[in-house]
Image (tube, helix red, strand yellow):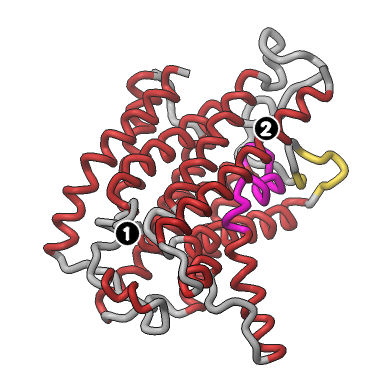
Amino acid sequence: MRSVLAAAFVAFIISIFGTPIAIKYLHRLKFGQEIREEGPKHHQSKRGTPTMGGIVFIFATVMAYIVAQLVIGDRTVSPTALTLLGLFVGMGLVGFLDDFIKIRKKRSLGLNKRGKLLGQVIVAVGFAILALNLPDDKGFTVASDKLSFVRDLEWANLTQVGAAVLFAFVVIAAANGVNLTDGLDGLATGPSVMVLGSYVLIGFWQARHTCGLSWLAPTDYCYEVRDPIDVALIAAAAAGACFGFLWWNAPPAKVFMGDTGALALGGLIAGLALTTRTTMLLAITGGLFVIITLSVIIQIISFRSTGKRVFRMAPLQHHFELAGWAETTIVVRFWIIAGIGVAGGLGIFFTDYLRVL
């Protein structure tokens, strides 16, 4: 537990003090955000706000893991940590390329759809291959080839190919869900802290109830997971880093995370769900991201099939902006929705344990 708390603290300190330094250099490099012309008109005042701030919390998370695990925890880096951090940094790199093209060409669109999707697929499939093929001495791999909810569903064996396809889908869906949510100041950062916090609790709980540790886990209830304390540590580091970043990203934002941060966060959150064997539970804990993604899907289907729009504008947050809601009102109310989803997901997870007592 000491290393988990240390990771969160170190990441927070690096992020909250490192972000203003990054803002200064991003200003100097003229790495400012481009704004969609068709968006709400008052968003044009945000043009030029430094973007790619996700670099800071990605760096803070990795450094916090190294400090907490190697210095305080006095342990080696586990395969689980390497795959999760690789997914985090890899998705961030795809977002970085997208952001860089936007800035270089001074437009609101970066990589084309195919290029962006291809980059995400490469990173997601790489994660899947590693996660399914690195067993420990108990035979546990980083992630399972079974479908899972609060634990693996024994009857839902996907095979390695099926599991790899599922992993890629979950990672890409989560990454783009967070990216779509990142449309208002602090809107994606706050819920991400909540969801990451839930995986700190889940990972730590699983570490205390890992199968094979009879002195901790009751024989009739345990989790077949790999390196759960590392999962909790990385989730804590990312949550602390995002919390520090939120100081500067809250309305009115001094910096945006950009696709660099949004894709990285979504990818990491998906990876945490897969490594804790709570894949389908992510739809509840990350409920806000699901709702916002669905609003885009509904809008596209409705417009292409009927020529009519369901919402004034998608993603959903812009619908409420055009309806006259203040930006801070939308952000706070969406944070409340995110909190309800996280509380519901954790409630379901721990209720499964209470069921067997």
- Foreground of the two, 241 or 320: 320
Q: Neighbour class for label 2 at 10 Å: few (<14), some, many (≥20)?
A: some
Quadrant of the rendered structure where residue 292 is? bottom right
Mark 1, secondary structure of its residue: loop
Q: Residue 243: image x %, image y %?
A: 37, 40
Q: What residue do we see at 46% from left, 42% from top?
A: 193
Q: Position of residue 232 (x, y in %)?
A: 52, 30
Q: Which mark is residue 104?
A: none
Task: Check the picture and name the quadrant holding the C terminus.
Answer: top right
Which residues are drawn in magenta? 275-290
Residue 87, compared with residue 345, is above or below; it is below
Please identify the residue farthest to the top as the structure is shown: 215
Relative to 131, does residue 201 appear above or below in the rendering? above
Q: Which amino acid does the dot numbered 1 rest on? A: Phe
Q: Is residue 276 magenta?
A: yes
- Work out whether residue 184 or residue 301 is closer to the camera in this orientation and state it: 184
Q: Which residue shows up at 78% across the image and 21% down it?
A: 221
> Residue at coordinates 37% horizontally, 70% vertically from top-left?
98
Residue highlighted by disc 1: 256
Q: Earlier in the sequence, mark 1 or mark 2?
A: 2
User: Can you identify the residue that label 2 sits on?
Assistant: 140
SS assignment at label 2: loop
Report crowding for label 1: few under 14, some 14 to 19, many 20 or more residues within 10 A (C-alpha): many
Tell me the amino acid under the disc marked 2: Phe
